[in-house]
Image (spheres, coloured by chain):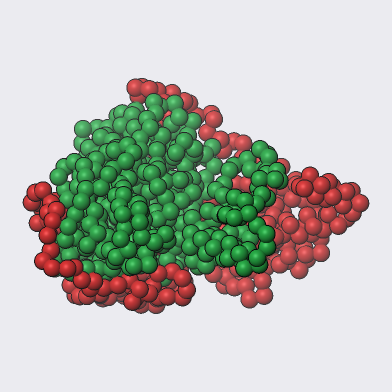
Chain colours: A green, B red
Amino acid sequence: MSGRNNKSKSGVDTSRRGFLTAGLAGGAALAATGMARANGDPLITEIQDWNRYLGDGVDAAPYGMPSEFEAHVVRRDVPWLTADPVSSVNFTPLHELDGIITPNGLCFERHHGGVAEIDPADHRLMIHGLVERPLVFTMQDLMRFPRENRIYFLECAANSGMEWRGSQLNGCQFTHGMVHCVVYTGVPLKYLLDEAGVKTSGKWLLAEGADAAAMTRSIPIEKALEDCLVAFKMNGEALRPEQGYPVRLVVPGWEGNMWIKWLRRLEVGDEPWGQREETSKYTDLLANGQARRHTWAMEVKSVITSPSPQAPIAHGPGRTVITGLAWSGNGRIDRVDVSLDGGRNWRPARIDGPSISKALHRFYLDIDWDGSEMLLQSRAMDETGMIQPMKDELRAARGENSIYHNNGIQTWHVNGDGVAENVEVS
Amino acid sequence: MSKFLKAGVVVAAVVGSAVIADIAESAEIAEGEKVFRKCAACHTVGEDAKSRVGPHLNDLFGRTAGTVDGFKYSAAMVAAGEGGLAWDEQSLTQFLVKPREVVSGTKMAFAGLRKSVDVANVLAYLKTFDADMAATVATDEAPEEASAAAETEETPAQPAELPSADHDGPMKLGRLATEDEIAAWDIDIRPDGLGLPPGRGTVAQGEPIYTDNCAVCHGDFGEGIGRWPVLAGGQDTLTNERPIKTVGSYWPYLSTVYDYIRRAMPFGNARSLTDDEVYALTAYVLYLNDIVDDEEFELSPDNFTEIGMPNEDNFIPDTRPAEEHYAEKTEPCMSDCKPGPVKITMRAQVLDVTPDGDEEGGGAID
């Protein structure tokens, strides 16, 4: 699989390593022939095709796609995780991205009955239950409410869930790739609820999707009125089908399963509904056999995205950039510390780019690498004072069968060749 | 380049329109085969076709409605056949667009094909399994008439005649939902029984429904095939190294079983079961979990909330913020935080389950 993903359409190995190796080999071959050549990099001393011949015109790509040399930057899945790809997950390639915004086509997917295909003209959103006026909205109706733009991360509660028992998957795409962060455009849910008139007895909201899983979650009315959005755009364009086109719920800082996609129904009630996804699933089994439920908030978390197993240090000792992501469902990230020695000693990293509540934060640590082995860790702290725990602290408190809400500190071992591996440390 | 290619195709079309007609027809059949995937959860065609959730569809054209031997139709479908309904292009087109309008009471839960072209294509595909019709496919022009019929039929279904701004909400947007609309979508059931529809079903009635619709993934005894969910057993495993979370061992409420089967099962053919069938299946899942032991046990709204689930009391609120590592909230350690050099205790490469081949790993995401 990685072979396929590392090849461009022409079959050329376009991974970072392959690219370097090919360049070196080309140089060596030229040197060996002993032909009269200008002294220097032939990519500079010789005229290249792209410098001579015309490229595509403006009519070649009405909807633009990434360069063919980026063909390996794709979502990937783990086939053995689930029974069927129709009810499964794929992962954002965090190791290839930078900044804080995830491109729409790379946002991880999780759905339980495949991607529903809905013509927006056929979509309806109903609000009923404990309201003064049960209402039906068309997409056109929704677009007439005042809109807001907000940047939020969305993390699946099961992100890093395969790592509870120890290091398993070798790549931050797989260990941490069930997270993305985009700009949503949508209508505050409060406006829709006000339009229907929530009765004072209304304490809970049931949100339901129109897909073949008819996904449902109960949400307390305070959260619904506080900051939830009914969103129809992501990063400026329509939601992607796999993200709930034409309309989804945005539940900032809370687990992704609650962000109902293909949103078609909101029922107001006075108690939670005990739906499958809040009883049988998305409850956290503890070592003593009890299980926590309604564990909605995503806790403070971070991960180094490069270097990481899929993004080794390819240039040898010297200046290098350590970078990663941090986020918290509680608000802003105040600080990220990075350790090169497995958590014995820490130094603050530099957060760059906007620091937005409940959004991804990008951090950097720029170092001179001496070529010795490193045990890289990052540790985030949020504005409420929550500090990202060590994995063993989480295991001591919860056991190893929680599946959900694993926000423990990740360790990458980087050897002298710059190769990185997912490890656990003492 | 592409401009020249297109021109080439146009020339070929003019020269060989007969060829094009053949191509178009086979394209129609191929598209129809794709559309048929929506039907294939319940219907089969071809040599080994048998009636399953729905009747087989071989030699459909000319068949009187409700007459395949051995298939248990709704009373409404049998009555429609007795009243003279036979399947031809026109009746099938009307039926496939709005099944429940043509035969009110049909147990076919499929909502209908929205696009006329899908109807035409799927009929072209079905004709290839009809001994009488197969020969006529090439010259048949009925699909066009049929699509016209489908379109005229769709027109009155638009809610345009419903009033808009018919309420005094602050922004006067949207319209009032009708009682029928709310009833059609409000299918959730709460642990206290709120939302349970009228109906009933026994363990014994549930068994054949389970065998036909559920066992293919969940196994004959709810043991789960492959990685499909295990439904039964697992009692007393929640503190094990590998707990088995089933309806009996883990689920806190019976209402969730009814609600979930009704909204999302069978996988790929949701909303196809009647309320009575869901009662029977729910009773059967209780039986598989030894929560009831009488095959004649009948589940209905009368006794539903009396059934307690064994694990209900083991669910607790979110106590994460009180965990030791959070509660302290002190300034984190910055130097000499661990005694002596840190050692590696586990490596992902040893397990080697990162996707790259045919690995089988552990863990789960849901």
* Front residue (pair B316, A29): A29
Who's the residue at 19% across and 60% down the image? Answer: A343
Tell me if I can see residue B31 in this picture. yes
Instruction: Between residue A22 and residue A80, name the one nearer to us.
Output: A22
Horizontal arrangement in the rendering, residue B342 relative to residue A95 (left or right): left
| Looking at the image, residue A11 lies above or below residue B239 | above
- Left or right: A167 as drawn, with respect to A101: left
Q: Nearer the viewer, residue B260 or B302?
A: B260
Q: Quadrant of residue A32?
A: bottom right
Check the picture and name the quadrant holding the C terminus of chain A. bottom left
Q: Is residue A179 above or below residue B207?
A: above
**Quadrant of res A196:** top left
Q: Position of residue B138 (x, y in %)?
A: 82, 58
Q: Is residue B264 visible?
A: no
Name of the residue lying farthest toward the right:
B15
| x and y percentages locating residue A84 in the rendered image | 45, 66
Give percent across and percent down for residue A407: 24, 56
Residue at x-position 78% and y-position 54%: B24
Task: Give the x, y percent position of residue A392.
Answer: 17, 65
Residue at 62 percent across and 51 percent down: it is: A45
Residue displayed at 32% across by 63% down: A371
